[in-house]
Amino acid sequence: MTASVSATAGVATTAPVVSVKPVVLHAPERGEDLRVRVSAPATGHGLPLVLLAHGFGSSLDGYGPLADHWAAHGFVVVQPTHLDSRTVGLPEDDPHRPGLWRSRVEDMKRVLDNLDVVEAALPGLAGRLDRSRVAAAGHSFGGQTAGILLGLRVRDPATGEAEDLSDPRVRAGVLLATAGAGGDSLTPFAAEHLPWLRDPDFTRMTAPALVVAGDKDDLPFTVRGADWTADPYVLSPGEKSLLTLFGAEHFLGGISGYEAAETTDENPAHVALVQRVTLAYLRHTLGVDDAEWTTVREELAGDAHPLGRLESKRAAG
């Protein structure tokens, strides 16, 4: 296990960030134990929690620009390494592969079930976590993982059932460049090889969420183009917000890591905007502070801002 203390690269910080990895959560039925990274500010109490699900193939070492930023500004961030990670090396014929989408959700719930272990693993964290204020965030495949915790339903390819796998402990979410509608919106490849994309039901995703989409995110899984990734906002009820980044591709300027090689559209300004808006949203939706969320909504209303647009809708009634 390794621990580190650092300031967030390239952004102003309010506190040094302390991280520890891997924290190992025992999971005998999973095939191997769950390894997570825990990051937190070195100071402060009553800290909200963000569970951050990585995209397909990544790991607990990814998404430093988000995890470090949120932690430096008062959040505990826990990053599981899901079974699809390249660091796991799951064989193509492994029986866990068809259920990867479900095992990711179970990973996130396992973290919540083992917060005593999580707190104890990071020196000085015990007693500083506010377990009543929890959000789920995720990029790409991880966005679906977070969405399921908020009420999104996915039809299990094995059973044909679309179960409710939401978790009442998760109050809100941040869904970054994630999948939209199934059916005719999918390419033949996606329909055949990615069964968890075939028939999502966003009408049950009632919990508050911020959806982040790049208007140049032309994924090979859909025939519709970049607007597909805005579907979690368009098709879901309840209080939702949508940040559209102008000119951004799937990695939204580089949220997946600090190295340029990790993104197709390196743009520090886009990353900084995602950092700012997601932090403001998390603080707002988890009841920390509303001031910055009000400010960014005003600044990003309409199409006047060169980097993006922020819009919101309220719950019906």
Image (spheres, grey):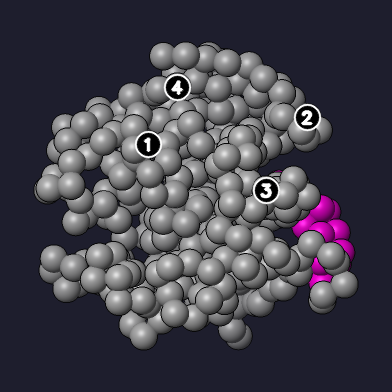
Count all numbered tags in the image, as a single digit.
Answer: 4
Q: Nearer the viewer, residue 10 or 145?
A: 10
Badge 1 or badge 2: first in the primary sequence: 2
Separation (CA) of disc 2 from disc 4: 22 Å
Locate residue 37, reporting x and y percent: 46, 28
User: Is mark 2 in CB contact (under 8 Å) with mark 4?
Assistant: no
**Residue topped by disc 4:** 21
Q: Which of the pair 155/43 is nearer the observer?
A: 155
Q: Amino acid at mark 3?
A: Glu
Residue under label 3: 266
Q: Which residue is mark 2?
A: 14
Q: Nearer the viewer, mark 1 or mark 2?
A: 1
Question: Label 4, label 1: how many angstroms apart (C-alpha)?
Answer: 11 Å
Over which residues does the magenta segment extend? 287-301
Q: CA distance from mark 1 to mark 3?
A: 24 Å
Q: Is there CB contact under 8 Å for labels 4 and 1? A: no
Counting residues from the N terminus, which is met first, the one under dot 1 or under dot 3?
Answer: 1
Q: Are marks 1 and 2 in contact (CB under 8 Å)?
A: no
Nearest to viewer (mark 2 / mark 4): 4
- Amino acid type, residue under disc 4 in the picture: Lys
Select label 3 or label 4 by which is in front. Answer: 3
| Residue 49 image position (x, y, % from top left) | 55, 40
**Residue type, numbered disc 2:** Thr
Above or below, 35 against 239 in this view is above
The disc at residue 222 is none
Residue at position x 34%, y 40% in the image: 85
